[in-house]
Image (spheres, rainbow, N blue to C red):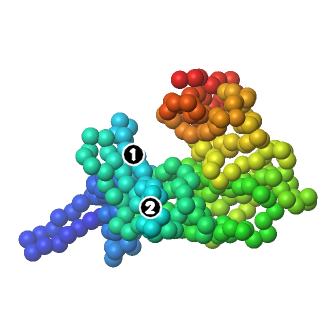
Amino acid sequence: MAVEHKKSGGSVWLPDDIFFSILSYLPAKPVARFRDTSVSRSWRAMLSSAPFVQLHLRRANRPGQLKVFFHTGSPVDDDLPVEHFFYTWQQHGGPAKKLMHHGFVGAFACLITKPLHGLVLWHSYGGFFVLNPCTNALLALPNTKYPLRNNRYMYWSYGLGYCLATGEYKVVRLFSSPCDREAAATCCEVFVLDAPTCWRPTAQQPRADNTVKVKVKDPPVFLNGLFYFLFRDGSRHHLGPPPLPVANLALDHELNLTELDGCLCAYYGESCSRSYVLWLLRDGDHEAAQWEQL
């Protein structure tokens, strides 16, 4: 595709690669607006292509530029409406910036996952949703409204991931603690976004153990193409492989998982202070990987 603007005095020609590069530096909202309103099919195809999306992601997430994503909490006064807005704050970039003009009044209960390429996973009493705060695009995931149809389990956990090989965004959900004797101890399903499909079982299922459970408040950590689920059994925690850095914790300590500096991180908060105890698992995909306490 070549970009050409004809004028009375001649024409100006812009090579495809330069036009491609210029648009990749724009914020997500102007790019989406330009794509949706463009009269050129070739432009729309280019702005939706995997190479452009990946280049835009790399340039929007350059290393050394700390950007904090957060949302407003619930009001203290019960008479005030519950509204959730999204903001970003750029290091050395002035005040926080609101990403959306309209809040979700009383709609969402909690944020499930950290942003993944600008997408976040939300949970509410109306089900699970994938939201792009920059464009206000919202996708309601099918069969996620409680109570679930044909639900045979007491606990479940949802996570959001991305497949680099196919360029697909996927939501996984893991069920545990069956209330049906004929159901498997655990069941894992996957849903591909923007695809004419439904929930389907994953090729590999987690180990069968009726004594462990997962919860919505413990979403899996997506790291290097893998989902890491945390199983709980009373005061015990399970993650394998690799095993957790501590086998047993005090009853007032609750272990959690997250991603920190590109590594799997396990942490818990001290009950008598505002301090956290953290471990990092470097080279987590290697069999000999060891936890390192910070």
Q: 140 and 19: which one is in front?
A: 140
Rendered residue at 17%/64% (across/down): 12
**Count of numbered circles in the view:** 2
Residue count near mark 1 (Cα–Cα under 10 Å), binned few <14, some 14–19, many ≥20: few
On screen, residue 222 above or below 281: below
* Residue 179 in picture, x, y percent from top left: 85, 59
Disc 2 packing (10 Å; few <14; some 14–19; many ≥20): few
Residue at the location (75% across, 36% down)? Answer: 236
- Residue drawn at x 59%, y 45% is 222
- x, y percentage for residue 213? 76, 48
Residue at horizontal 45 percent and vertical 57 percent from the top: 76
User: Is label 2 in a helix, a strand or a loop?
Assistant: loop
Horizontal and vertical percent position of residue 273: 52, 30
Label 2 belongs to which residue? 77
Query: Which disc, if any, is residue 68?
Result: 1
Residue 169 falls in which quadrant of the image? bottom right
Examine the rendering and report whether any part of residue 167 can be seen.
no
